Amino acid sequence: MTRRQSVAAALRRVPLASDPAVVAFLARPINVVLTVTALVMFAVAWPTLSVTHHVLTVLLPVVAAFASLPIMLAWARPAPAWGVSVISAVVIGLAFEPVNGWAWHIQVVHVIEILVLTTATFLRGPIRFTPIAWAATCLITLLGAPAGARAGWIAGVTVLFVICVLVRVLVRSRRQLAQETELKDVAASRSAVLAERARIARDLHDVVAHRMSVVVVAAQTARYRVDGVSDTVDAEFQSIAGMAREALDEVRQMLGVLRVDDDAAPQAPTPGVADIDRLVAATRGAGMAVDYTLTGRDATVPETVGVVAYRIVQEGLANAARHAPSAPVSVAVDVSATVVSVTVRNGPGDPAPSDTHPAGGHGIPGMVERAHAVGGSVDAAPDGHGGFRVAAVLPSRPPLAAITAG
């Protein structure tokens, strides 16, 4: 334990030190140093006061306390401490005559205290109060200092006042400059993010939204452009058009979010576990054999986890449609008190004839990233029987750190 820590511990053992305000005061090392300094000055002022002034013995500790103890508040409350010190100096100078040979009307310890508190007030007191402190200190010097030293002391206090004001102006300017620089950096970062979001929105609009619109139009007008389209085939085209419209709506929602500021971003409804049934039905309408099982209550799943579960099922069905469109697919979602388990399994099958541009494996990493964002995990691998299995385990209550990290 260092000497400063020992002194602080000793001060805290004083009964008054158990008060919360005192504990907070002594928590700052500079206040501990000033308190020790005040006690040392008090120990010097008490026995030497009778040497410089005619003071009754019973009043020696009281006068010595006013001449020394206010300095302990030089950092925490400089202006009030300065006021107590100056007023007590005036009262002491008027009430007690100095001993013959002592030219000052106040004790030397009191002079040191006034100088320290005046400097602290110039540096840390209210800026509008500093001229008052300067004028009052000069007045005290006129009243208490020897005639030959008054001009020098007033000049010294004035120089001290100017230096302290310049220091305050410099510190304030640097703080304002640092704040302005920080605000500019934040604005630049925000501008870069918005520019990148606008670029992504343009790319999505130019590529995905445009082509999805073409798919919708082509599917809806197929029966008028192609001869011999039966009602069954037309129903398939209408199903394709419906799914394309839903995908186009989602893309447009994403474009809206990307193109607006974060504070004004619309709160578009996000899909969850309850919407998986509709997703499976749409996939069945496209001609795939999908078996769906939901265990537990989907209403208990938070939105952040529900949208991840939905997207994992959506990607699993898309992969099955791409790589094994003729194979049966099973989707199982189990909601418990602690986890949400999602399993998408498809049997062996041949890739779709239109799958001439493989996805490049971006779907599985996307599922893994979504799961990790809420503190979950994904296992995607062949099932050993020619099929493929995607299994995700998501926490029912994702930790805040995981959501923030995502």
Image (spheres, rainbow, N blue to C red):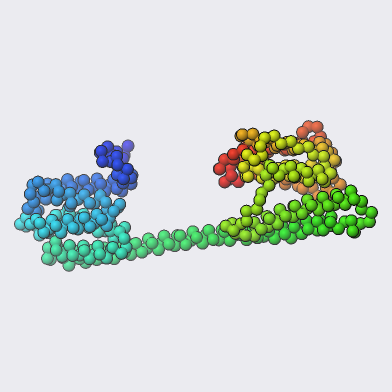
The answer, for residue 204, to whether it is visible in the render is yes
Task: Quadrant for residue 146, please give it.
Answer: bottom left
From the viewer's side, name the closer residue of 230 and 321.
230
Where residue 60 sits in the image (x, y, percent)?
Answer: 11, 48
Residue found at x 83% / y 52%: 238
Q: Left of 229 or right of it: where is 128?
A: left
From the viewer's side, name the closer residue of 24 and 362.
24
Residue found at x 72% / y 46%: 362
Instruction: Give the farthest residue toward the top.
Output: 384
Where residue 109 sits in the image (x, y, percent)?
Answer: 17, 53
Where residue 315 sits in the image (x, y, percent)?
Answer: 73, 44
Q: In this rendering, is residue 236 above or below 147?
A: above
Q: In this rendering, is residue 190 above or below 374?
A: below
Residue found at x 26% / y 63%: 160
Where residue 144 sits in the image (x, y, percent)?
Answer: 14, 61
From the viewer's side, name the closer residue of 65 and 237.
237
Task: Quadrant for residue 344, please give it.
Answer: top right
Q: Left of 165 or right of it: where is 321?
A: right
Q: Left of 281 or right of it: where is 60?
A: left
The answer, for residue 319, to whether it is visible in the render is no
Residue found at x 84% / y 56%: 220
